[in-house]
Structure formats: C-alpha cells, structure tokens
Amino acid sequence: MSIDPLDGPAAGLKESLAAAIDHDAAHIAAVGDDIFAHPELAYQEFRTADVVARELRALGLPVEEGLARTGVRARVVGSRPGPVVCVLAELDALHAPEHPAADPGTGAAHACGHNAQVAHLVGVARAMTERAAAGELAGEVVFFAVPAEEYSDIGRPGVSDVEFPGGKQELIRLGCFDGVGLALMAHASGVPEVAPAAPGAGRPTAALGMDWQYTGFTTRRAVFHGRSAHASSAAGHGVDASAAARIALHAIDAQRGTFAEDVRVHPVLRAHPASLNVIADQATVDTLIRGRSARSIADAERRVDRALRAGALAVGAVVELTSAPGFLPLAVDRTLGGLFRRNALVLAGDAGWAEHDFSAASTDAGDLSHLMPVMHATHGGCAGVNHSARFRVVDPVRAYVQPAKALAWTVVDLLHGDAAAARDAIAGYRPRHTRAGYVDAMRATTRRARYPEAAEPWTC
Ligand SMILES: [Zn+2]
Ligand SMILES: [Zn+2]
C-alpha cells in the first residue's frame, strides 16, 4: 500500500507550499518566459544570473553571486542542524541560431528548457520563505543557479578564468558544493512531433517523470594534416586531409554494430575554408562518444581512435588526436527519485507520470552524482524535441508550476522534522569520488597524441 504524501506530519506544510506556488503562478511563469526571451550561452549568463539574484534578494535572502562566473546561491536555514539539500537550476541556453526565439547576436536559444528550471527555483524559494517553511525543517536548503550545462563544442569553456566545460564541474572544483548533502532538479522533456504510432513516439509526454540513468561521454578532436596541391594537375603531390576525414567517418560507421548497445557516437566534420581546385591540407572531425558506463565509453573510444588513425594512414596524412573532459554518467538516486515519484503521482496522477530506465542524453549532474545523491527528474509542458528549433513551453502550469510543487514537497520530505529521510539517503549513498579525486580524474582525461608519430607528410 502506498503512503499518501499528504497524510503525514508534513502534510500541512506541503499543502501550504502548494497553495503559495499556485498563488505565485503568474509571477513564476513570467520569470520563466522572461528567461526564455533572453537566452545566454554557457558562462555568459550574466543577465539571467541577475534575474535570479534579484528574485532571491527580494525574499530577504543573502545572495552570493559570481560563482564560476555566473552562479548564484542563497540558503534558507532550518530550525535545527541537519543535512544540506541543494535545489539546482541551470542558467544557460544553447547555440541554436535557427530557433525562432534565438538571440540574433549570439545564436543562443532556450531549446532545452533551462528557463523553466529558473522558474522552479524561484517558485520553491518564494514559497519556502513566504510560508516560513524553515521553522519545520532541519538542515538547510540551498538554492543554486548554476552556469553552463550545454556542451556545444570541444574546447569549451573558451573563457580563460574557467577550467571545466560544465558549470557543475567547475563549481565542484571550486568547492562550491562542499557541505551539500544532496541535490535535486527537474529538466524539461520535449515531445516528438510525430504521430502516436510512429517510430520515436512514446517518450515522456507526461507532466512529470524520471529517466533513471543518463549517458556520460568523452570527447575526441581529430585534426588531419595533409599537403596542399593543385587538385587536378598536381593531385599526386598533395595529401588530401578531407579524404582522411571521410575515411575515418566511414570507419566509425563500419563499427557501429560492434559498439555496446548503450553507446552513441556522433561525429561532426568541421568546415574549413576550402577551394575546389586545391587539395585540402587540413580537416577536423569532432566526436562525442557516449555510453552508460565508463567501461562501454572506453571500449567505444578505442574503436573510434582506430578509425581516426585509419583515415590518416590510408592517405598518408597525420592526425592529431586530443581529448578534453566530458560529463560522467548519471544514475539518479533511488531514494530521492522515489520521494519525487510519490509526490508527482499526487500532483499529476498516474497518467501524468512517465518513467524510463535510460536517456541517451548527458548532463554534468552526472558528475555531481559521483560525489552525492542526485535527483534529476523530468517535466512536460513543452512542445518539440529538446535542442530543436521547434522546442518551446506550451503549458506554463506543467512546465513551471507543477515541477516547483513537486520539488518543494520533496525538499520537505527530506528535511521535515529531524531530516530523517535526507540522513537515510546520504547514509545509503556511496560516493565514487572526493572533490580532489574528481578534479584529478577529470584533468587526466585531457590527452594529446599524434599518428603516425614520426610521419612528415609534407616530404612524401
Ligand atoms: Zn540541452
Ligand atoms: Zn538541458
């Protein structure tokens, strides 16, 4: 028999918070819509951060700003000591210049719904302060708006004062998660624009949901160096770097049947200035190699590296291979996820809940999950698949309001009374990294190699 989350000692507080969020619904939605209309790229979310800081300061909370450039943090302290629960919201948009709401200058667009996360954070913070929730809670609630979740290019962050591409990665490095016991967030889940019976249908269309696991990934940049020559009359004196890249891409594709079933490899051939009558002396292939486990990622990585070297070998080019930190796989904490599910079922009903074992997407919440229990739920209210020009919020209640309630209720479950549920979740969790160990491991993923090592194609 399931326990009704509104039939316990925290029921009154939960009902009060839900009423406060309903009362604030127009304000919460206006914040979400405002962020959608002003998208900013990773580590450049200065206006978005200002909105968050202004909202939190208006509640009388002391606000820290400028964490990993744009991170904003405030805390509500409970009536007794206890664990620290962090409510996360991602600040950044992604580069999607074809999106109708894209910033014409930067090409940024909120095609991944992070604007909704800011609305959730504001909604939970407003409700908890307006209804003086801290008096019934132990521990602390940290509201943390974080930069840079989208990983749009190898070589990012591209800003000199940041080391890691992911905002949560960088904040871990800086010690900004030290002392946090658990972290929660909800992410938009878009809807494919296909008929219900078509392939690809069936992903979450529900109000709230959970994908229990997400892939991690590593990266590879392959720069092929050839030799320029007249493309026809002196072709034999050239080394075609673009041909090396094409062979490498075919060799990756030829191995797709051998990758572990949870692996996704998606290379991109970068355009270089090219002339039709000159043999290309340079070509670049960038690849994300995703998988559900470090083991399957490493296996795919070996196959991709062979393919990249094969392209160089076939035409007598040289390839320089570099890798940079990716994101770690995410396994959602079962205790936290179970609390969220119980609340979501009350708020959205059975038909409004969808859960899946696995999502092929990746997030730097995975990195955080190697240091603490993390809950990464999904919410609906959006149309179009994520990262497409069609993605947009269509139902502000589902996108902004309901997830805020479900997150607020889950925080209450964790910290109500003497915070027994939060203590249980932390006790049942085994960290896979210390902060220092994590930073060392990520730095160790930065590698550089050249193949063939001694070749000089320009003297062939
Ligand atoms: Zn995204
Ligand atoms: Zn996202």
Image: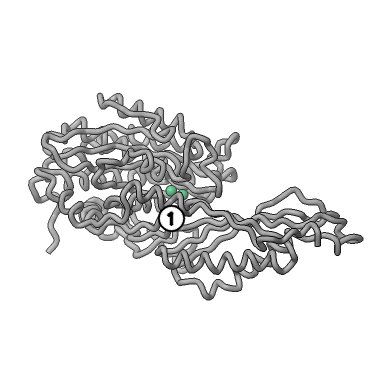
Residue 352 shows up from this direction: no
The structure residue drawn at horizontal position 52% and vertical position 56%, both measured from the top left corner, is 219
Callout 1 secondary element: loop
User: Where does label 1 land, which residue?
Assistant: 362
Q: Tell me residue 242's x, y (percent).
A: 73, 59
Q: Report the side of 13 relative to 94 (left or right).
A: left
Q: Tell me residue 81's x, y (percent).
A: 13, 38
Closer to the camera, 243 or 190? Answer: 243
Residue extending farthest front = 454
The structure residue drawn at horizontal position 15% and vertical position 35%, both measured from the top left corner, is 78
Give the residue type at disc 1.
Ser
Q: Report the quarter where the C terminus lies.
A: bottom right
Q: Report the side of 151 relative to 318 (left or right).
A: left
Q: Report the side of 365 relative to 110 (left or right).
A: left
Estimate how packed mark 1 is, as few (under 14), some (14 to 19) or many (20 or more) residues with alpha carbons within 10 Å.
Answer: many
Instruction: Work out whether 391 lies above or below 126.
Output: below
Q: Tell me residue 19's x, y (percent).
A: 20, 38
Residue 49 shows up from this direction: yes
Q: Tell me residue 337's x, y (percent).
A: 26, 56
The structure residue drawn at horizontal position 64% and vertical position 65%, both measured from the top left corner, is 309
